[in-house]
Image (cartoon, coloured by chain):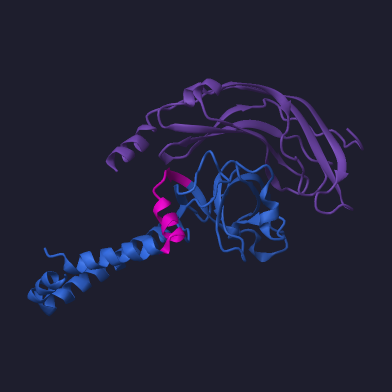
Amino acid sequence: MVLLAAIALSSFVFIANPQGDLAISSLKVVSSNARRYPNKKQDLAFVHFNITADLAPLFHWNTKQLFLYLEAEYTNAKGTKNEVVIWDRIVRRKEDAFIKFAGKNKYMFRDVSSSFKNVPPAHYSLKYNVMPYVGVLTYGEAARTTEPVAFPPSQSRL
Amino acid sequence: MFTEELKAFKRLGFRHVLLQILNFASVIASGLMIWKGLGIVTNSESPIVVVLSGSMEPAFYRGDLLFLTNPAGERYNTGDITVYKIPGADIPIVHRVLETHDVKPKKSSKTAATSPVNQLLLTKGDNNYVDDIELYQGLEWLERKHIVGKVRGFLPYVGYVTIAMNDFPQLKYALLGGLGLLALIQRE
């Protein structure tokens, strides 16, 4: 019991704040049919991005795994503040903690109003969640786009 | 077989038995008080939960213990792991937040200034391929009122006792009976 508490507390000693790079290489908006209502139109955004980050410093003896996720933040035309995870990865070993990834979004990126028309540019950020063997879950941000990326007008096909 | 024990029991007397029962009751009562007190501090109806499914593997396995908080004024971020309970479903679900949408309250309503923003959430289990919309029983989004709490701390395996007790009810009765007997017979 005491040992477990000591291990849990010891992870507060390890403070790492790794920084990486994140760049959005392309962004397309395509008009498509909604998932649950086939007659409704729904804009989907397709994001291509590059990530480079060395997250090895986050691994210490009480790190079970890292949950890494790429998030888009924007406020839409109606004033709704949105955060949408578009890609994630679970890192389980220190050897895999150097992230170099280029690819596209894993999860559907859509707006609640079903359209990206007149939506202000979005910020993208790479965040992580350190999950311990025992103790407290911690969160952090590893990279962020320097400039917000604007949504292009929607096209009928990719 | 039990003559020896019974004799010891008689020797202790009626008063002692009553005292032991009282002790036992106070143990149970303080346990309940701690649980309810934790519930008030964390603002969560169940501040400690046991993971019942493998949908968050490899983060959480069956039997892991999670500690939750649910501060009233706090908003949920993506990446947070929440425990939610859909009305109609009897089992709370532990999944990670995939999308948050802070919808502004309508300006016309009187409570707009005081009421917190209504947050719409979408969740997904780390080990599932698709998001949870099928689990919401017809709801489009998860709302704040469905959420039991946010996972803050983690303790592996400990909760397996409760899973074992649910799977083998005999074990539960054996454990309870054993504890009760021990409390009655034990002398200080």
Q: Is residue A78 toward the left or the right of residue B126 in the image?
A: right
Residue A133 picture quarter? top left
Q: Position of residue B132 (x, y in %)?
A: 67, 50
Question: Which image quarter is the N terminus of chain B in?
Answer: bottom left
Instruction: Please report the bounds of the magenta region as a residue range.
Output: B152-169
Q: Position of residue A140 (x, y in %)?
A: 53, 33
Q: Relative to the observer, which residue lies in front, B13 or B49?
A: B13
Q: How many marks?
A: 0
Residue at x-position 64% and y-position 43% = B128
Residue at x-position 50% and y-position 44% = B61
The shade of chain B is blue
Chain that is coloured purple in the picture: A
Q: In the rendered image of this protein, does residue B170 appear above or below residue B70?
A: below
Instruction: List the single residue furthest toward the bottom.
Output: B14
Residue A72 picture quarter? top right
Q: Is residue A31 toward the left or the right of residue A113 in the image?
A: right
Is B78 in the magenta?
Answer: no
Residue A158 picture quarter? top right
Is B165 in the magenta?
Answer: yes
Q: Is residue B119 toward the left or the right of residue B108 in the image?
A: left
Q: Relative to the observer, which residue lies in front, B40 or B146?
A: B146
Q: Relative to the observer, which residue lies in front, B98 or A4?
A: A4
Q: Relative to the observer, which residue lies in front, B32 or B41?
A: B32
